[in-house]
Structures are given as C-alpha cells and as structure tokens.
Amino acid sequence: MFLAETLLVSAVLLASPAVDRASRTFDVAAPGEALVTIRAGCGGCAWSVDGGEAAALRLTLDGKYSQHLIAARGEALSDYRVTLGAVSAGQHRLTIERDAALSAKHAGPATIEIDAIDVLTSGDDFAAQSRAPILYARANTVGRFTDLPILMWYEIVPTSRGRQFRYSVIFTNEDGGTPTDRLMATWGRTTDIEFVYGVEVDDRGSVIAEEFQGPGHEVPPFRGRHEGSHPLLWVSTDNNMVSESGSTAVRYAPAPERFDLTNVSREVVMDRHPWSYRLTAEEMTREGKISNDAPPKSGKIPDLRTFVFVEACGEVGDAALAFAVAVRDRRDSAARGDITWFASDRGVAEFRIVRDGCARVAIPVTGTADQIELRGLRAMAFTRPSKTGEPGRTSTVRLTRVNTAFMLDDHYLPRPPLLQPWTGDERVRVGGPPFEIAIK
C-alpha cells in the first residue's frame, strides 16, 4: 500500500473468481487517481500456442470504456495492475468482461477477480500515476497477440528547471527493428524496451514541457491530446515508437512502477517480474524464432534456457565491447573438466556493445544450467567499425561493474546468480588482453 499517499476505498474482495465477467462497486472519499489489481487467468491458454494465446478483457468504469487487459500469462490466476485514471468523490463501478472478438479463437473462459483498488491523492506516486501515458494498440497487433505492452515504469530525473517524470514500456518483442539474435547479443533480451513519454514539471508541479519518442527514435515535443492529465499515445511503428494520433481504439494502461536505475540496466525491471522472461520466450517459440542450429545473423536464436545473461557497466568510448564465459560441461566425463569459452558477439562485429552505461548481453552455450558450470567471465575490447567503411578508431574500454550472470530454469524463469558482483576500475585495451574474472 501507499500509506499516507493512498486513500483506501471500500472494495470487498470476491470470495472466488468470477467467470468471464466481474463487477465491483467502490466508494471514494476524495478525488484522486484510481489503480486496481486484477487477478486473471485464461482457461487452456498458453502464449506460445497459435490460436490459444490469451483472453482479452474489456474494462469499463461507470459504464465508460477504460481499456483492455490481455490475460496472457496462462490458466493460473496472475496479478495485473492497471491505472483507471482520475475518479471523483463518490461511488463508482468497475466492470470487467471477456471480449470474445479480441480473445484467441481457441481460448477458454476467463477467470477474473478484482483485488485491491487504491486511490492516490498526493505525493510523487500520485503525480506519476496521474501523468502516465495511455497506450493505444498498434493497428497490426490488435487480435494478433504480438508486441504486447506488459510493463511500464517511470524514473524521476532532476532538471535545471525542476524534474522530469520519464516513462518507459516493455513490449513482449518487436516485429521490426533489431533482429532477434542481435537483440540477445547486444541487449540480452528479446523484449523491446522503449522510452515513450517524458513530462517536466517545476517545483510547484506545473508542467513545463512534454516529449515523446516518435518514429525514427526522434524525441519531439508532445502536443497531442490528454485524458485528464494522461497523454494519449498510439504505438505506430513495428519497433514500437509512438505517435500523437492513430486509428485504433483498443488501448492499454498498465500502472507504472517507480525504479531507480543507478548502476543497473533497464532489464532489472524484467528481473522484478520474472514471468516476463517466460512470456517473451513463449512468443519467440510461437513466431518460429527458436532454432538451436541457427547460425549468427540468421535472425533466430537457440533455446533461451541455454543462454548466460551478463550485466556489466562501464564506458565503451570509441571501441566496442563483448563478453565471453568459460563453461565446463558436466555431461562430458571424457573431457575431464575441459573448459570451453563462448562469446557474446559470436564473431560478428555488429553483435558487440557500442554504448556507455550498464548493459546486458546474452551468450548461448552448449547446455542448460543443470548441464554446465560457469567457470569464468571475460570482457574484450574491439575496434568499432566505422559507418563510412573506413577503419574505426582504437580506444580503451573502462569496466566499472559486473552486476550479475544468470541462466533461466526449466520454466524460463531467472535462476540465482552464478557469480558475485564485482566493482572496480579496469581498463581493457583494444588489441590487448581481456579482463577476466574467475568463478569457483
């Protein structure tokens, strides 16, 4: 709960989940921003199965359309937290119904339970929730169960005039943009994570400026419409950039969580919600992007349970960075403990990291976590290719942190870390020896 910043409303929990329709009346003592936690499941559904992906739920508040919620996490009841928007003092009624037209054709009944309803009235959480964007679905995703926005978070960043609330969204994948194998090599995931909207406010909370990430990754001022204080954004490109207008009416409003990403990568948001790894793995399976024998640059990847996920921080400068892991295969008794190194770039220059800050890579190895042992980690610096085709400039990578290395379990959920965090100030020179961490 949000304690002093939250006004609890009277919403008695359902004794048992309803089937295909649930409704709840609640009373609000003072105006604020309403959020609800919904527990939902879809009978016989699996995000990996074509035609059986999920049930679509339609939410109305006081008889007015609010948003859709896609119950994408299978048959078991799972928590989904969404923003309902501004509510006045008085009595309100939330209704949730299965939308047969937008549900998968073989999806079974939806079980629905309306859990906690909270109303925020003051403080940073209220300010952040009241300005969270409402996302309208990309036209070619409606009814197709692809590139679903599943998580939203915000950061509060100081500015010279006040501070900015920055909102980012995690989509299950991107149908356009970076190929899947390059995504894993340079971002350590197959989800698509995008900054979508920022609003700068002064010390009194008045809006100074708004911006959004539009097509081509440009960030122009936002001059579109609002619903209350919520900006309305339409996902408009196959790599999930947004626009100020669009043609679709289906929309989503996941409740954003606050994160401080100092010295960590954005993928930490996924770690907080481990089910996101399973969901994206299931989408890769359904879309035919998993092939254990696929070579680099094929756009396909091996089983996600055979990857080692590594997070590190530093300054790449004019160079390029890759990692490698030393693996001993427990199944190969004849090898007598031989070590094999596997690199994140797989010998491909564009599979290397070329950005500063904290980043993740995912390295395919020859077995699952139960079949191999991780014995070492290397950081390697390379000359960055020039966009003009001329030789790139040499430089030195500065490595300051290795935060984690982990694999996924049989259910595609993150297992415990395989190494202890490392901090320091190590310089890795292009053409020089790699920096190595031994793992016992």
Image (spheres, rainbow, N blue to C red):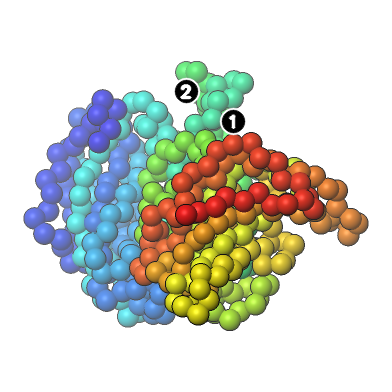
Residue 260's label in the rendered image is: none
From this view, report whether residue 266 is shown above or below residue 106: above
Q: CA distance from mark 1 to mark 2?
A: 12 Å
Q: Position of residue 404 (x, y in %)?
A: 49, 49
Residue at the spot x=76%, y=54% of the render?
382
Q: Is residue 325 left or right of residue 1?
A: right
Q: Amino acid at mark 1?
A: Ala
Residue at the spot x=61%, y=59% of the render?
324
Residue extending farthest to the right is 390
Residue 209's label in the rendered image is: 1
Kindly state the secondary structure of the residue where label 1 is placed: strand
From this view, report whether residue 151 is shown above or below residue 176: above
Residue corresponding to mark 2: 205
Using the rendered view, name the quadrant where residue 76 is placed.
bottom left
Q: Quadrant of the N terminus?
A: top left
Q: Which is more toward the observer, 180 or 305?
A: 305
Q: Amino acid at mark 2?
A: Gly
Q: Position of residue 318 (x, y in %)?
A: 78, 45
Q: How crowded is the residue under tag 1: few (<14 C-alpha within 10 Å), some, or many (20+)? A: some
Kindly state the secondary structure of the residue where label 2 is placed: loop
From this view, report whether residue 435 is shown above or below residue 1: below
From this view, report whether residue 335 is shown above or below residue 65: below
Using the rendered view, name the quadrant where residue 235 is placed.
bottom right
Q: Is residue 308 left or right of residue 45?
A: right
Q: Which is more toward the observer, 302 or 19?
A: 302
Q: Position of residue 399 (x, y in %)?
A: 64, 42
Q: How crowded is the residue under tag 2: few (<14 C-alpha within 10 Å), some, or many (20+)? A: few
Residue at the spot x=52%, y=59% of the render?
375
Residue at the spot x=65%, y=52% of the render?
379
Q: Which is more toward the observer, 28 or 332?
A: 332
Q: Position of residue 130 (x, y in %)?
A: 40, 36
Q: Is residue 224 visible?
A: no
